[in-house]
Amino acid sequence: MTAAKNGRLKEREDNMEAVVRIKRELAYQGTVLKIYRDTVIANGIEEIFDYIKYWDTERKNLKVATDGIVLKVNSLKQQKNLGFTAKSPRWAIAYKFQAERALTRLNMVTYQVGRTGAVTPVANLDPVQLSGTIVKRASLHNADIIEGLDLHIGDMVYVEKGGEIIPKITGVDTSARSFMIGEKVNFITNCPECGSKLVRYEGEAAHYCPNETACPPQIKGKIEHFISRRAMNIDGLGPETIDMFYRLGLIQNTADLYKLTAEDIKGLDRMGEKSAENIINGIAQSKE
């Protein structure tokens, strides 16, 4: 690589260290190019592990969340020889830090029904600080996870953030159990919303509510998906509005949206005449 204009680096460079140095010089000259200031060259595996150990602690002081670092082969010639797989370079690898873990109490397990009918168990916890946020709820994913953890109400459980984003329960401190421990958590057999018998299809980890035409979360979820930006992209409508329309009996499916009039919805909670007209116009435009 050659620095073309400033004359400071005239010789041909052949490593990542030179690439970083040139980028830094360009950044110092006032270009919009940004370069991470803590990039280093490691001479051996011990220096790599020292760098990992340092940032595993120091990353908590960064202004943005991070879950790992990237290691790259320094030589550009070696990079070229190593080449690429179908998805990524062979000369670079991401190292993921171990997720931060916290211990807190399991108070209860509730269940959410999605638009596909999948039922997801959710752990409700004593609030706990984790990776910069207060966590009160964590996913339990499915019945197999619950059974594998042998969960009881009142258990002290370990919580991590999957990919530093989604909280999940990864273990139970069984030594903290006493004779006061609550009942064992068993996955429900009926839909918490409509009461239908849940089913589990062969090869599936999730349980499903089969009542797709009368289960409220499934109906509202399908309508919300229909109006979303990736689908019909109807302006003025959102989950709260869909929920209100459904509760008031104005809609039962996506087709009912096209039967609405401004007269039907103006005067509803937080729904003035202008807002009503905007919604009806948005629905009409989706047909074009």
Image (spheres, rainbow, N blue to C red):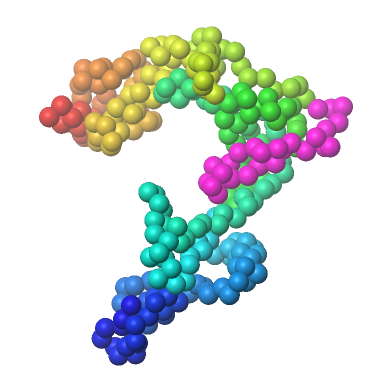
Residue found 60% across the figure and 31% down from its top:
140
Q: Quadrant of residue 75?
A: bottom left
Residue found 51% across the figure and 9% down from its top:
196
Residue range (magenta): 157-181
Q: How many marks?
A: 0
Q: Position of residue 48 (x, y in %)?
A: 60, 68
Residue 213, compared with residue 169, is above or below; it is above
Q: Position of residue 172 (x, y in %)?
A: 74, 36
Asked if the magenta segment contains residue 180, the reply would be yes
Residue found 26% across the figure and 86% down from its top:
5
Q: Is residue 122 left or right of residue 240?
A: right
Asked if the magenta segment contains residue 175, the reply would be yes
Closer-to-camera residue (84/132): 84
Quadrant (top left, top right, bottom left, bottom right) of the C terminus? top left
Q: Position of residue 33 (x, y in %)?
A: 34, 72
Quadrant (top left, top right, bottom left, bottom right) of the N terminus? bottom left
Closer-to-camera residue (81/159): 81
Can residue 1 be spotted in the picture? yes
Q: Position of residue 179 (x, y in %)?
A: 87, 27
Residue 1, compared with residue 226, is above or below; it is below
Can residue 126 be spotted in the picture? no
Q: Residue placed farthest to the front in the image? A: 81
